[in-house]
Image: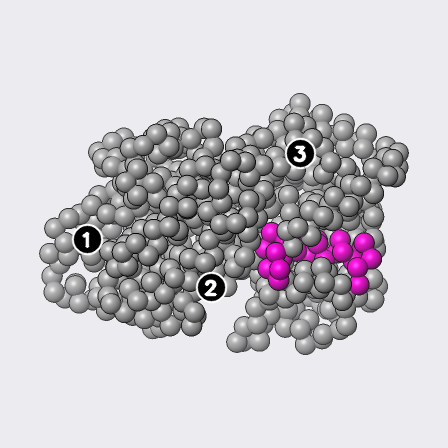
């Protein structure tokens, strides 16, 4: 048992954090926190307004400009994550947006940004999406953009390049771009702003590829195909081209998703707005108007006056995670708050739409949850597993209230398991790795293959439902065994990075009854213990996604990552270890006056090496969860974590 003083201090820390979290709950029971990326999304938002020639909103521009200037790096450009290195594509967009709203290019911050771009090869060295943005404004040539004819949407499913073989986010971004690439509209750009000064007379720097394990043969083959498509672009039969553009339009309209937008992600939504505009839809047309409204839902207006645009909204994810943390608090008040959150989640289960995932699994009934408020065509396995885990945990308080939702979530999850035993986020068997070699895919994130973190979450769910020994879970455990790194860690696709992945898998192994003494668990424990910082916390930077990653590099302690490490170690039976005690002490020592933890770093994964996320809710949820679990386990005679997360 804990000494009374320690018990009292833990109780105080837990209840302060729980009260602070509960104060952020919406009246209808859900939680939603800011989801911040990098400068590219607010910069693109400014450019979208000028592309459409919308009326000036100088106050809005000034407030977004303040945000963009604040996140500029000391290197002169803009990074992809807090205090990260210079990124040329983000910098070109940030610079263009500031110039668009009136910043003097002779101002010191603009000079530094321009010099950084030119020293990195100029705007010609940017990624594909940035080159498209420039081409739409007549500020860059279309010839440098890989050709994607709209006829792609008409190809049979057996064809090697097919939209269904790409990840959901790529699919929804690409389809409206197919129309834009064909029509090549020119932005209205009423101020006539371009960025010629960001181009070198002759650049020898090639755009960087972020593709892991690129294959030379595929790369050469797809490069030759791109050359052929460019030279034959005017030879497509007009009737077939019109049919292809109509198929693209129909695809987008079917998935418009109300005012949550196409795919419920900014790039796809913005592309759909520009597509409708290019097709001649006026601002009042219902399809264009609802798509444009979806963009506005992503705007954050901060109390300090800054404004920025989020890449998407995360209410289902935030609500499910907050419910877990509140259930761990084990107070009547926190339980009531958690149940209100779960009640809010029930009607958001997708039960009547067979989304794009059904192309690969046509016989599976819908039953998942999406990440956003609404995204019925694109529920995901991670959200679904986390929601089911929380609902199953609440059975002791509510009986069978959530049983139907749990059953449908389980059924859908089982139906989306990939052949290799793992789970991807949105689709089954989305592992067509050769597609990452097409010129358009320089971001290296065209696919949604199974990953350790999502697979672990699904195993945790099945095990908590009493099916840890069943064939699907056993196949998944085999997958996880193959995927463990030599140092004992696991890769984290959707959280930064190996700390996140290792936490996820240790929870799954515990839920499935894998003993702490097994080599997989003990080596993971050794790795987490070995990388603990001297101050007791854990930290990991986004540079751990680098293609030349050679092992963990020390990083300053962060509250969310410390929470993950603690939850992982406790799942592995280490509740009484010195490492856990030191981590708990760090969380208690860094808890702020408001009961929460400060955290500016990006600890969420969007697309490795390309796009990262700062979940503002993570530092409010995971430290509370870890502290409450530590207190609960130390108070009890049972040291084994009884839940899948």
First in sequence: mark 2 vs mark 3 = 2
Give the image location of residue 371, x and y in percent: 50, 53
Q: On residue 453, which mark appears?
A: none
Residue for badge 3: 162
User: Which residue shows up at 17% across the image and 47% down it?
Assistant: 639
Where 265 falls versus 21 (above or below)? above
Q: Quadrant of the N terminus?
A: bottom left
For the record, the magenta segment spans 257-282
Question: How many numbered discs, if any?
Answer: 3
User: Which residue shows up at 81% across the image and 29% down it?
Assistant: 228
Give the image location of residue 183, x and y in percent: 83, 48
Where 542 falls versus 56 (above or below)? above
In the shown orientation, is residue 246 left or right of residue 466? Answer: right
Of residues 603 and 328, the one nearer the viewer is: 328
Residue for badge 1: 633
- Which element carries disc 1, helix, strand or loop? helix
Residue for badge 2: 32
Label the magenta part by its dominant secondary structure. helix
- Which element carries disc 3, helix, strand or loop? loop
């Amino acid at each position: 048992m804990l000494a009374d003083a320690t018990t009292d201090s833990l109780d105080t820390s837990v209840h302060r954090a729980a009260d602070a979290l509960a104060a952020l709950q919406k009246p209808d029971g859900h939680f939603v926190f800011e989801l911040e990326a990098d400068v590219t999304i607010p910069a693109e938002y400014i450019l979208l307004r000028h592309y459409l020639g919308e009326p000036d909103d100088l106050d809005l521009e000034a407030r977004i400009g303040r945000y963009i200037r604040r996140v500029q790096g000391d290197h002169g450009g803009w990074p992809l994550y807090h205090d990260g290195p210079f990124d040329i594509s983000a910098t070109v967009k940030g610079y263009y947006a500031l110039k668009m709203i009136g910043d003097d290019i002779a101002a010191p911050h603009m000079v530094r940004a321009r010099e950084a771009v030119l020293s990195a090869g100029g705007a010609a060295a940017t990624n594909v999406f940035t080159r498209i943005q420039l081409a739409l404004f007549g500020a860059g040539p279309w010839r440098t953009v890989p050709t994607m004819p709209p006829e792609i949407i008409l190809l049979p499913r057996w064809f090697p390049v097919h939209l269904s073989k790409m990840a959901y986010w790529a699919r929804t971004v690409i389809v409206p771009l197919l129309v834009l690439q064909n029509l090549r509209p020119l932005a209205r750009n009423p101020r006539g702003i371009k960025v010629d000064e960001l181009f070198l007379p002759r650049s020898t720097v090639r755009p960087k590829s972020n593709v892991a394990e690129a294959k030379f043969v595929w790369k050469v083959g797809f490069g030759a195909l791109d050359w052929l498509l460019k030279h034959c672009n005017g030879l497509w039969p007009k009737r077939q081209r019109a049919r292809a553009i109509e198929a693209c339009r129909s695809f987008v309209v079917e998935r418009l998703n109300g005012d949550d937008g196409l795919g419920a992600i900014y790039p796809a939504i913005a592309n759909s707005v520009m597509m409708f505009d290019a097709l001649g839809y006026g601002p009042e047309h219902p399809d264009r108007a609802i798509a444009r409204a979806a963009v506005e839902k992503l705007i954050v207006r901060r109390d300090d006056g800054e404004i920025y645009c989020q890449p998407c909204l995360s209410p289902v994810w935030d609500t499910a995670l907050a419910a877990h943390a509140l259930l761990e608090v084990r107070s009547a008040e926190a339980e009531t708050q958690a149940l209100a959150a779960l009640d809010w989640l029930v009607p958001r289960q997708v039960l009547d739409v067979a989304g794009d995932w059904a192309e690969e699994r046509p016989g599976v009934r819908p039953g998942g949850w999406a990440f956003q408020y609404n995204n019925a065509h694109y529920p995901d396995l991670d959200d679904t597993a986390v929601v089911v885990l929380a609902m199953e945990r609440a059975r002791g308080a509510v009986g069978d209230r959530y049983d139907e939702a749990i059953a449908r979530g389980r059924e859908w999850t089982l139906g989306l398991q990939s052949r290799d035993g793992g789970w991807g986020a949105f689709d089954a068997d989305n592992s067509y790795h050769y597609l990452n070699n097409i010129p358009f895919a320089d971001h290296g994130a065209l696919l949604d293959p199974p990953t350790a973190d999502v697979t672990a979450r699904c195993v945790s769910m099945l095990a908590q439902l009493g099916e840890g020994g069943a064939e699907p879970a056993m196949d998944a455990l085999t997958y996880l065994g193959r995927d463990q790194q030599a140092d004992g860690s696991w890769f984290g696709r959707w959280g930064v990075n190996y700390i996140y992945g290792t936490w996820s898998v240790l929870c799954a192994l515990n839920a499935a009854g894998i003993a702490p003494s097994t080599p997989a668990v003990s080596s993971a424990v050794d790795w987490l213990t070995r990388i603990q910082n001297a101050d007791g916390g854990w930290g990991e930077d986004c540079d751990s996604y680098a293609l030349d990653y050679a092992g963990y590099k020390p990083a300053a302690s962060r509250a969310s990552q410390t929470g993950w490490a603690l939850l992982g170690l406790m799942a592995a039976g280490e509740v009484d270890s010195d490492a856990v005690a030191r981590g708990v002490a760090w969380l208690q020592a860094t808890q702020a006056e408001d009961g929460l933890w400060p955290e500016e770093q990006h600890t969420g994964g969007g697309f490795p090496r390309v796009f990262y996320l700062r979940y503002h809710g993570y530092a409010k949820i995971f430290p509370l969860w870890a502290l409450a679990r530590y207190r609960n386990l130390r108070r009890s005679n049972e040291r084994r974590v009884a839940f899948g997360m």
